[in-house]
Amino acid sequence: MSYDETVIADITAELPQLNAAALRSIREMIDQLKQNEAAASPKNGGPASPTMNKIPAAPKPLAFVGENLTLEEFERLTLKERAMLKRRLKERNQQWLQEKLSALAAAWVMVIDGEVIASGKSIKDKPRPPQTVEISQRLGKFPFVFVNEKFITI
C-alpha cells in the first residue's frame, strides 16, 4: 500500500461518513502537494541548495486547492463535517483567499472550484442560506463563502 493510500485509509477510518466527493478533494490536495514537491526538486529544475538561487524565480500564481460538493453531497454532511470542510479549505487556501479578498477589496467572496463567482464590499451583502442554496441549484455545486476577517468587528 502506497503512502497516499495509507493516508486515505486513515482518513476514511477516522471519518467513515466522508463521501466520494470529499475523498476526491483530499486526493487532489495530496496530488497538488506532490506536484509542488516534484517541481521544487533539483532534477526538475528546482534549487539544489538554498544558496544556488541567486535570482528569485517569479512566483507561480496561487491555485485554490479543493473541490466544492453538490448540494446533495453537502446536505448529507453533518454540521460538524460542514464546518470542518470549510475550515480545512480556508486553512489550505489562506494565501489565495487573502489575495482575492485584497484584489477585490471585498468583505467576502463566494468560491466554486477555485473561481470567485461573487463578492461583496460589505458583510451586510453576504448571501443568506436561501440564496446560497439557490446558487447551488443553479450551478450544480454548493458554493463556499469566505469572509475577510478585517471586516469582522468585535
Image (cartoon, grey):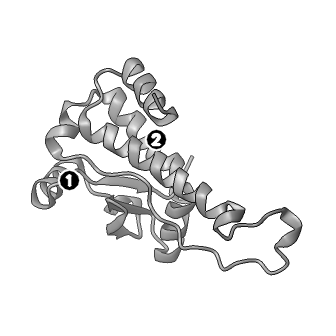
Q: Residue at x 48, y 69 (%)?
A: 100
Residue 74, given in percent of the width and then of the height, sits at 22, 39
Q: Find out whether the residues at labels 1 and 2 contact each other: C-beta distance under 8 Å.
A: no
> Is the N terminus in the top left, top right, bottom left or bottom right quadrant?
top left
In front of the other: 90 or 14? 14
Element type at mark 1: loop
Q: Is 103 displayed left or right of 24 in the figure?
A: right
For label 1, the residue is: 141
Q: Is 62 displayed left or right of 21 in the figure?
A: right
Q: Which residue type carries mark 2?
A: Arg
Residue 17, given in percent of the width and then of the height, sits at 28, 23
Residue 48, given in percent of the width and then of the height, sits at 79, 63
For label 2, the residue is: 87
Measure the alpha-carbon separation of dots 1 and 2.
Answer: 18 Å
In front of the other: 135 or 29? 29
Q: Which residue type carries mark 1?
A: Lys
